[in-house]
Image: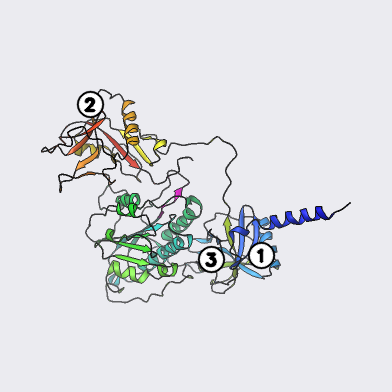
């Protein structure tokens, strides 16, 4: 019997099996350890310190590798055997110690450990009051919001550099005076429909570290870069932070507010449609463009055009801390009492991890490095996409459903909007306020709806006809005359009104005093401008922050 064909088939099978991760790894930069439990594991050729933020950034071929987490003895042995075959005697795993304790740097929640000797916890930073200065030398209190671009326009290395910037800036500011912080990522499809995207302000090192850890978890596990950044919607949603009212969704106690936003977006229409925030006392808005091709967002900065920055690389982002601090507090980083504090320029090694774990392949056990400073090989992973289920039945959840609301989602529109008809008649200005009633979702601010296409108008009209109000002749929606130019009209929710779609009744709009608000007319399917003081039912809507409607 000729065994050669069988041998060739066996060898071909083994070759295919060994190449499971080949397409995902840049062979010139890293060595593959192949796949286990749905993730590809690789070792970069370059040695790094244990806390290096960018150690895995150049490993992937069109995908982003992160530091390895180990979930079981099976994985641990697999990795150790792979390292031994390369051969490397030891390599960092992605386990680090911070003020919150030992944790996986990629956000994994695995509790598996394989210590040779459980390490003593390093001395932690202060965990209560963040400031390390005497009260007389502290700067005035500040609240800082940082919006991190996690969109298709960005990359994982740039996004995680922004996270590291947030960590470094909060430590730098918090050491010099009382401060509050809120960090969030935006621009990705969210796997959970009601994710807490905009967190509350926090004010201690422990709390900011937890927020950073949650942010990494969100980016690694709850975000999919499949849709472009909707910068306009994100910027509109910043009203959750941008006020000092006692009823604010995200109240802050500080004297000062500064908001910082990153953008890599090249979508000019989306950027240009963003409406700037109104100047507020003791506030600033700092905009940071990333890359040469991103659309300029500095017109949204406060003071207008003066607080805009453009950077190119992850290292540029990490080096922004002293510059941003001086923009927030003045031209110097000195304390109120005149004490200037030294700042060490952040680098790719700038993290708050005070100890790092590495694996020794001889005994397959983990050891503590002590200070994360020794350069070793680093183990990286890429979690392979989960293949779609063969079951054709899709479990779908209405993204507009909430137990105490009556908002309606039209799947055919694909516009990420939720609609509702009011239950009371109001004048136009009061109808705007009525949209906010009985609405528990802090992420959104319902307003009188825009209507941008005929298909959208047809669906809105079907919503009206399902209500016990079909005998009503007109309904307010969100179109209004521009008070600075009587020939122009605008949507009050910030959407763009142009000639691409309009449905005026013949002879309208009329140039009549007081007829500055627009209503849908039911009997002839048209729009009319009429007296804003009329009492009409209204149509409200809000836009949610993700585009995938199947959960």
Q: Is residue 190 magenta?
A: yes
- Front in this rendered view, residue 327 or 353: 327
Ranked by sequence position, the earlier of labels 2 and 3 is: 3
Residue annotated with mark 2:
473
The residue range painted magenta reads 185-195
Res. 442 image quadrant:
top left
Using a 10 Å C-alpha cutoff, classify the residue at mark 3 as few (fewer than 14 neighbours), some (14 to 19) or many (20 or more): some
Judged from the image, the secondary structure of the residue bearing numbered disc 2 is loop
* Left-right relation of 370 to 527: right
Judged from the image, the secondary structure of the residue bearing numbered disc 1 is strand
Q: CA distance from mark 1 to mark 3?
A: 27 Å
Q: Residue at x 44, y 64 (%)?
A: 161
- Front in this rendered view, residue 142 or 397: 397
Judged from the image, the secondary structure of the residue bearing numbered disc 3 is loop
x and y percent of residue 115 in the render? Answer: 63, 63
**Which label belongs to residue 365?**
1
Q: CA distance from mark 2 to mark 1?
A: 76 Å
Residue annotated with mark 3:
58
Q: CA distance from mark 2 to mark 3?
A: 62 Å
Q: Residue at x 33, y 30 (%)?
A: 463
Display colour scheme: rainbow
Ranked by sequence position, the earlier of labels 2 and 1 is: 1
Res. 500 image quadrant:
top left
């Amino acid at each position: 019997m000729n065994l050669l064909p069988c041998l060739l088939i066996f060898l071909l099978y083994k070759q295919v099996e060994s190449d499971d991760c080949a397409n995902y790894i840049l062979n010139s930069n890293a060595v593959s350890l192949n796949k286990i439990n749905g993730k590809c594991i690789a070792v970069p050729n370059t040695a790094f310190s244990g806390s290096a933020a960018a150690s895995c950034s150049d490993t992937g071929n069109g995908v982003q590798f992160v530091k390895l987490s180990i979930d079981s003895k099976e994985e641990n042995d697999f990795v150790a055997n792979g390292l031994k075959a390369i051969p490397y005697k030891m390599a960092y795993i992605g386990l680090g110690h911070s003020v919150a304790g030992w944790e996986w740097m990629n956000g994994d929640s695995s509790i598996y450990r394989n210590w040779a000797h459980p390490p003593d916890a390093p001395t932690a930073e202060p965990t209560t009051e963040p400031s390390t200065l005497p009260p007389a030398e502290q700067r005035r209190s500040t609240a800082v919001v940082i919006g991190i671009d996690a969109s298709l326009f960005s990359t994982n290395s740039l996004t995680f550099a922004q996270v590291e910037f947030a960590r470094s800036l909060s430590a730098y500011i918090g050491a010099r005076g009382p401060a509050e912080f809120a960090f969030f990522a935006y621009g990705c499809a969210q796997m959970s429909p009601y994710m807490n995207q905009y967190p509350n302000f926090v004010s201690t090192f422990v709390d900011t570290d937890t927020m950073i850890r949650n942010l990494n978890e969100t980016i690694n596990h709850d975000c999919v870069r499949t849709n472009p950044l909707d910068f306009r919607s994100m910027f509109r949603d910043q009203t959750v932070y941008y006020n000092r009212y006692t009823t604010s969704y995200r109240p802050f106690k500080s004297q000062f507010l500064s908001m910082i936003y990153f953008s890599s977006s090249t979508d000019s229409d989306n950027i240009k449609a963003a409406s700037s925030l109104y100047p507020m006392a003791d506030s600033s808005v700092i905009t940071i463009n990333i890359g040469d091709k991103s659309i300029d967002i500095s017109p949204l900065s406060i003071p207008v055009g003066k607080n805009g920055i453009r950077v190119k690389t992850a290292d540029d982002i990490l080096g922004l801390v002293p510059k941003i601090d001086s923009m927030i507090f003045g031209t110097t980083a000195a304390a109120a009492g005149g004490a200037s504090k030294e700042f060490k320029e952040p680098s790719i090694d700038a993290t708050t991890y005070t100890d790092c774990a590495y694996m020794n392949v001889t005994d397959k056990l983990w050891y503590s490095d002590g200070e994360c400073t020794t350069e070793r090989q680093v183990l990286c992973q890429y979690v392979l996409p989960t293949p779609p289920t063969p079951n054709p039945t899709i479990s779908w959840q209405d993204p507009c459903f909430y137990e105490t609301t009556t908002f309606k989602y039209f799947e055919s529109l694909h516009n990420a909007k939720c609609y509702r008809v009011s239950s009371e008649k109001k004048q136009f200005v009061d109808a705007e306020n009525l949209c906010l009633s009985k609405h528990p979702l802090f992420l959104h601010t319902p307003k009188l709806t825009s209507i941008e296409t005929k298909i959208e108008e047809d669906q809105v009209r079907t919503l009206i006809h399902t209500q016990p109000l079909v005998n009503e002749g007109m309904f307010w929606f969100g179109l209004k005359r521009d008070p600075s130019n009587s020939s122009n009209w605008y949507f009050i929710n910030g959407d763009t009104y142009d000639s691409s779609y309009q449905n005026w009744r013949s002879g309208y709009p009329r140039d009549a005093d007081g007829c500055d608000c627009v209503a849908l007319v039911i009997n002839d399917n048209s729009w009319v401008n009429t007296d804003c003081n009329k009492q009409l039912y209204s149509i409200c809507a809000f836009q949610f922050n993700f585009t995938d409607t199947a959960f």
